[in-house]
Image: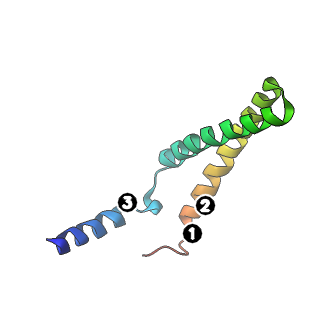
Amino acid sequence: MILDQFISTKRRSKTLSSSNEQLSRSIIKSVSWRVIGTLDTIAISWLITGTLEFALSIGFIELITKMVLYTVHERLWNKITWGKKL
């Protein structure tokens, strides 16, 4: 029984590997991570500048640029086989 679970888990992990990740999943991961990161950037910018409007403008620019960079970075790393168990 334990052996069956181990084999089943191994098969499932091979089919769910990150190399099979769809672009839409990478984009959703990017958006969710950037929301967290942008809220952090806005809070820090507000503390430093004391101006909420300026902090929001910094956050918005940072949100867009870092989502694009993260998605490209994620897709490139999905193509690299180094460090993956085949």
Q: Residue furthest top?
A: 53
Q: Secondary structure at mark 3?
A: loop
Labels 2 and 3 touching (C-beta < 8 A): no
Q: Earlier in the sequence, mark 3 or mark 1?
A: 3
Residue labelled with disc 1: 80
Residue labelled with disc 3: 16
Left of 35 or right of it: where is 3? left
Left of 38 or right of it: where is 1? left
Q: Amino acid at mark 2?
A: Leu
Mark 3 or 1: in front is 3
In which quadrant of the rendered image does the C terminus lie? bottom left
For image coordinates 80% across by 34% down, the residue present is 47
Labels 2 and 1 touching (C-beta < 8 A): yes
Local packing at callout 1 (Cα closer than 10 Å; few below 14, some 14-19, many 20+) is: few
Q: Amino acid at mark 3?
A: Leu
Distance in Å between CA atoms under marks 2 and 1: 7 Å
Local packing at callout 3 (Cα closer than 10 Å; few below 14, some 14-19, many 20+) is: few
Q: Position of residue 43 (x, y in %)?
A: 72, 35
Q: Secondary structure at mark 1?
A: loop
In which quadrant of the rendered image does the N terminus lie? bottom left
Q: Earlier in the sequence, mark 2 or mark 3?
A: 3
Residue labelled with disc 2: 76
Local packing at callout 2 (Cα closer than 10 Å; few below 14, some 14-19, many 20+) is: few
* Residue sitting nearer the eye, 66 or 56: 56
Q: Position of residue 55 (x, y in %)?
A: 79, 31
Distance in Å between CA atoms under marks 3 and 1: 17 Å
Q: Amino acid at mark 1?
A: Ile
Distance in Å between CA atoms under marks 2 and 3: 18 Å
Mark 2 or 3: in front is 3
For image coordinates 57% across by 69% down, the residue present is 80
